[in-house]
Amino acid sequence: MARCAIAVVAALLVLLGGGGNAAARIRVEYSGMVIRRPSSSIPSFREAPAFRNGEECAGGGGRVDVAMTLDANYLRGTMAGVLSILQHTACPESVSFHFLAAGMDADLAAAVRATFPYLDLRVYRFDPSRVRGRISRSIRHALDQPLNYARIYLADTLPPDVRRVIYLDSDVVVVDDIRALASVDLGGHVVGAPEYCHANFTNYFTDAFWSDPELNGTFAGRRPCYFNTGVMVMDVGKWRAGGYTRRVERWMEVQKQTRIYHLGSLPPFLLVLAGDIQAVDHRWNQHGLGGDNVKGRCRGLHPGPISLLHWSGKGKPWIRLDARRPCAVDYLWAPYDLFRPSSPVLEE
Ligand SMILES: *[C@@H]1O[C@H](CO)[C@@H](O)[C@H](O)[C@H]1NC(C)=O
Ligand SMILES: *[C@@H]1O[C@H](CO)[C@@H](O)[C@H](O)[C@H]1NC(C)=O
């Protein structure tokens, strides 16, 4: 009988759904359940199975804290990323997720909770006004979203019991046990990430930067190498103690005065940390799978073992798959996709 009533409500909601935005946020309460039609911009997802700790996790091998952002446009990527972590770790119940959301937090959080009912997760509101005045336009508009800068404020946002956090972009899938990344020796550094010392560092900064004697000495005494801020292990305590948030912010303020770099949140990180991070095995960031920043052309895999795939760059696998123009690497992402295209509102 309950089922029947829910079906009727479902039908009603589907009908109302055609009516546009007014119906989009309708809430129906039925025998203590809150059935909520997600706002129209939030896609619908299948529920992930419950993942349980293996025997080797007994005795508390330690919690792993993972931070990601929550954004309606990248939600499908976030869901896939979370699923991939749970699927490949021996201790899925020991992974805590920390999500930073800028707006529509309640709907986004509800979507994650519905998709992963067993997940240990917390959602924090990231106030975009904190960073808005400091953002200058980059060569790719998507890079200018305030939430892209939330990683700078992780240490201020996370509760004090989080000592170390893995920050991940929303366009990654992890195909190895995340505990291996979480336990890397940071060697006293505040951040660990794969380093790419063959990349020509000159090109990330403008001539105005390299020719200004007050700025161009910044890297003196360091051997600066490119690293990607989409996958980072961060010592949260050291970050706070060293005032790194403020140090990164200062470079963003310089950028507002004089254009010293081309991209968004990456260069201020490089200015503060390049040459002073713990190099992590390259297997933890097969980056660039989204193609270049301008056209998003297909890219192949770099040689070597892979623990994490990262669709950085313009193209995103869910968009290319939906458009039926996927790159070969996108088929590696597809198995983690929890998106439910027909979006049935209610389901037993
Ligand atoms: C790096 O790029 C700059 C500017 O494009 C160029 O002048 C320099 O020779 C390059 N360095 C290397 C090592 O390729
Ligand atoms: C910094 O700028 C000054 C003035 O343009 C120049 O003489 C110097 O070689 C630059 N130093 C570096 C490290 O680029």
Image (tube, rainbow, N blue to C red):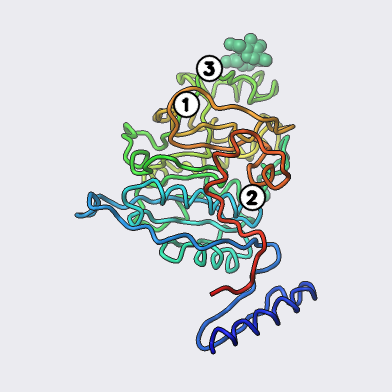
Q: Residue at x 45, y 24 (%)?
A: 304
Residue 316: % across, % down: 65, 42
Numbered disc 1: secondary structure: strand
Name the mark nearer the viewer: 2 or 1. 1
Q: CA distance from mark 2 to mark 3?
A: 30 Å
The three-letter amino acid code for the residue at tag 3 is His
Mark 3 packing: few (<14 Cα in 10 Å), some, or many (20+)? few
Which type of secondary structure does the marked residue at label 3 adopt?
A: loop
Which residue is found at the position 57% from the left and 58% from the top? 101
**Label 2 or label 1, whichever comes before in sequence order:** 2
Tell me the kind of residue under disc 1. Answer: Glu
Can you tell which mark lies on residue 195? 1
First in residue order: circle 2 vs circle 3 = 2
Percent position (x, y) of residue 318? 64, 46
- Residue located beneath label 3 in the image: 198
In-front residue for pair 80/220 = 80
Q: Residue 45, image x and y in percent? A: 58, 61
Report which residue position mark 2 lands on: 146
The part of the image, by quadrant, that contains residue 241 is top left
